[in-house]
Amino acid sequence: MKPVKFDRDYLLQDTLWPGVSLLVAAIVMAIGIWFHDQQQQVYETHSANHEAIHDDYDQLVYRRRLLERYFRRYSEFQELGFIGRESRLDGIETIRLAATGLDLPNVTYSLEPQLEVIRPITSATSGADIQVFLSRLEIDLGLVHELDMLRFFERLEIEAPGLMKVDRCDMSLQGLQGQELVADTNIVASCSLMIFSVITSDIHAAETES
């Protein structure tokens, strides 16, 4: 049996261009797959960066709102005199004006020296940036009525500098039982108050610059 002979020119004439087209298509497909993989990696990188930037933005917005909230609170405390050097003269003047405004028969007081408070727990974020001070105020009030004492402390809480806390208050009735002394002292209240103030690092820096 004779072997089959192929006409190379005839075969090439009909298969050359389809073969070339198939080869070009395979190359284009390979390039397309490679390019797609490259773009997929770029997309994943950009997507990860976008998520990271979005998270950073959310954290930045949260910190800004937190800063604004605490700055407002800090400003309020500073206006109240809780943050800053203790103004003892302003405190004494407030006591005098409150007693005069309520027509209290008698008011005597003594303001002890200011002492630094030793905090049982120190914040790791604040450290030595915050110092808390305490002054104790011993005050005796001559009252016509029990409500006068509440009105007096209410005025001090609003107008006196610093953060004030009533630590102790003893009351004793004056005069005979059932006898009301309108123009004189009916009740004597002996009270002990604690006045707190805070010094922050920015106050130290301002004093150093001045």
Image (cartoon, helix red, strand yellow):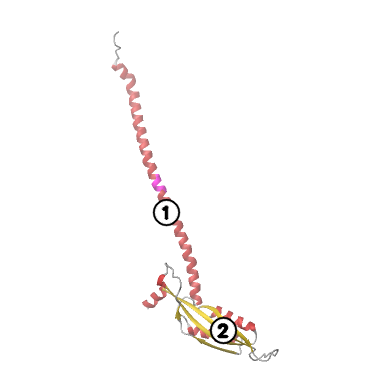
Q: Residue furthest top?
A: 1
Q: Residue drawn at (47%, 60%), measured in percent from left and top?
A: 62
- Mark yes or no: residue 115 visible: yes
Tell me if residue 153 comes above or below residue 121 in the rendering: below
Type of the residue with mark 1: Ile
Q: Please tell me which residue lies in front, 188 or 59.
A: 188
Mark on residue 191? 2
Nearer to us: label 1 or label 2: 2
Query: On the rendered image, what quadrant is the C terminus found in?
Result: bottom left
Few, some or many C-alpha atoms within 10 Å of disc 1 (few <14, some 14-19, many ≥20)? few
Quick one: 75 or 186, which is closer to the camera? 186
Q: The N terminus appears in which quarter of the rendering?
A: top left
At x 44% / y 59%, what residue is drawn? Answer: 60
Residue matched to label 1: 53
Residue 39 in the figure: left or right of residue 161: left
The boundaries of the magenta stretch are: 43-47
The answer to whether residue 188 is above or below residue 14 is below
Is residue 161 visible to the viewer in this orientation of the structure?
Answer: no
Give left or right: position of 160 versus 18.
Answer: right
